[in-house]
Image (tube, rainbow, N blue to C red):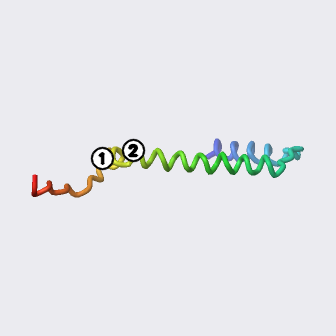
């Protein structure tokens, strides 16, 4: 309990002693950051699509077995 209180006091001191940062984000930088975020989301989506079957099998969510074609 004392350790948690000590950590809270350290974080509070760090937050209260912070100074403003002189950083300027122009619209070009903002749109670049948005493109990076959206590209990352798209990449995760493509990776999930590629490995969806393997992921389901690994997690134990197998679908119902499809019956074989009766004509073969």
State left or right for residue 63 relative to residue 43: left
Task: State if disc 2 and disc 1 touch (CB < 8 Å).
Answer: no
Find residue 71 and report its horizontal and vertical position in percent: 10, 56
Instruction: Name the residue: 59% across, 46% down.
Output: 40
Q: Which residue is mark 2?
A: 51
Residue appearing at x 73%, y 46% in the figure: 32
Q: Earlier in the sequence, mark 1 or mark 2?
A: 2
Q: Nearer the viewer, residue 57 or 1?
A: 57
Q: Position of residue 59 (x, y in %)?
A: 33, 48
Residue 56 in the image: x percent, y percent?
Answer: 33, 49
Relative horizontal placement of residue 16, taking residue 69 as reference (left or right): right
Is 36 on the left or on the right of 23, as rendered? left
| Mark 1 surroundings: few (<14), some (14-19) or many (≥20) residues within 10 A | few
Q: Quadrant of residue 21?
A: top right
Residue in view at x 74 percent, y 45 percent: 11
Question: Which residue does the numbered mark 1 point to in the structure image?
Answer: 57
Q: Position of residue 23 (x, y in %)?
A: 86, 44
Label 1: which secondary element: helix
Cα–Cα gap, marks 1 and 2? 10 Å
Q: Nearer the viewer, residue 56 or 71?
A: 71
In the image, residue 70 sits, relative to residue 51, either above or below, namely: below
In this picture, residue 51 sits left or right of residue 66: right
Report which quarter residue 10 is drawn in. top right
- Disc marking residue 33: none
Question: Image height check: is 1 above or below 63?
Answer: above
In terms of secondary structure, where does tag 2 sit? loop
Residue depicted at x 78% and y 46%: 29
């Amino acid at each position: 309990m004392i350790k948690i209180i000590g950590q809270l006091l350290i974080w509070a001191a760090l937050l209260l002693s912070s100074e403003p940062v002189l950083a300027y984000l122009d619209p070009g930088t903002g749109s670049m950051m948005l493109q990076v975020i959206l590209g990352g989301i798209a990449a995760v989506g493509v990776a999930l699509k590629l490995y969806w079957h393997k992921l389901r099998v690994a997690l134990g969510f197998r679908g119902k077995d499809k019956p074989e074609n009766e004509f073969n």
